[in-house]
């Protein structure tokens, strides 16, 4: 705000006061937009982390499913003898599938925690816009 004063009574003029108020409103609006932009970036970062966890979980579960299918094939081909081969495939397939399921659930929980837009910041910006556009 300007520090100059009118010569008559030593207080700022109406023009200077209005100019200072408009400058303060502009600064406040810019700060709100910067906060909003920061919160949106955080939400995007959370969403990308969740999506990557989902993709990794899905890929791991696919490997596990492939191993479980191979287990069934070997089980059918060696119904009576040679149980050690299909047991190995079964153990590895179950462990890989469980790890993939854990990563998938973790990613889904992360995605649920992401908000579309920060509600508080969005409301503040809407209030600022309403205040600026109200007829005086």
Image (tube, rainbow, N blue to C red):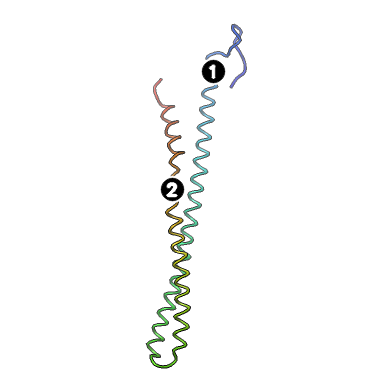
In the figure, is residue 97 to the left or right of 20?
left
Please tell me the numbered disc located at residue 49. Answer: none
Give the quarter of the figure containing the N terminus: top right
Reading the image, the residue beneath label 2 is 115
Residue at the farthest bottom position: 81
Image spot of residue 121 (x, y percent): 46, 38
Give the quarter of the figure containing the C terminus: top left
Seen from the viewer's position, the closer of residues 103 and 20 is: 103
Compared with residue 86, is residue 4 higher up or lower down, i.e. above or below? above
Residue displayed at 47% across by 57% down? 50
Image spot of residue 6 (x, y percent): 59, 10
Residue displayed at 43% across by 72% down? 62
Compared with residue 62, is residue 23 higher up or lower down, i.e. above or below? above
Secondary element at image label 2:
loop
Reading the image, the residue beneath label 1 is 17
In the figure, is residue 5 to the left or right of 89?
right
Image spot of residue 19 (x, y percent): 53, 20
Residue displayed at 61% across by 13% down? 5
Q: Quadrant of residue 72?
A: bottom left
Residue displayed at 58% across by 12% down? 11
């Amino acid at each position: 705000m300007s520090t100059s004063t009118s010569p008559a009574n030593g207080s700022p003029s109406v023009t200077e006061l209005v100019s200072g108020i408009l400058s303060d409103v502009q600064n406040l609006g810019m700060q709100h937009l910067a906060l909003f932009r920061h919160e949106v970036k955080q939400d995007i970062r959370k969403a990308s982390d969740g999506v990557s966890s989902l993709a990794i979980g899905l890929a791991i579960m696919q490997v596990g499913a492939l191993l479980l299918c191979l287990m069934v094939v070997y089980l059918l081909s060696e119904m009576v003898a040679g149980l050690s081969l299909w047991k190995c495939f079964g153990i590895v397939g179950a462990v890989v599938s469980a790890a993939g399921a854990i990563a998938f659930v973790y990613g889904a929980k992360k995605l649920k925690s992401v908000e579309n837009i920060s509600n508080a910041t969005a409301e503040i910006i809407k209030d600022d816009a309403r205040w600026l556009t109200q007829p005086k």
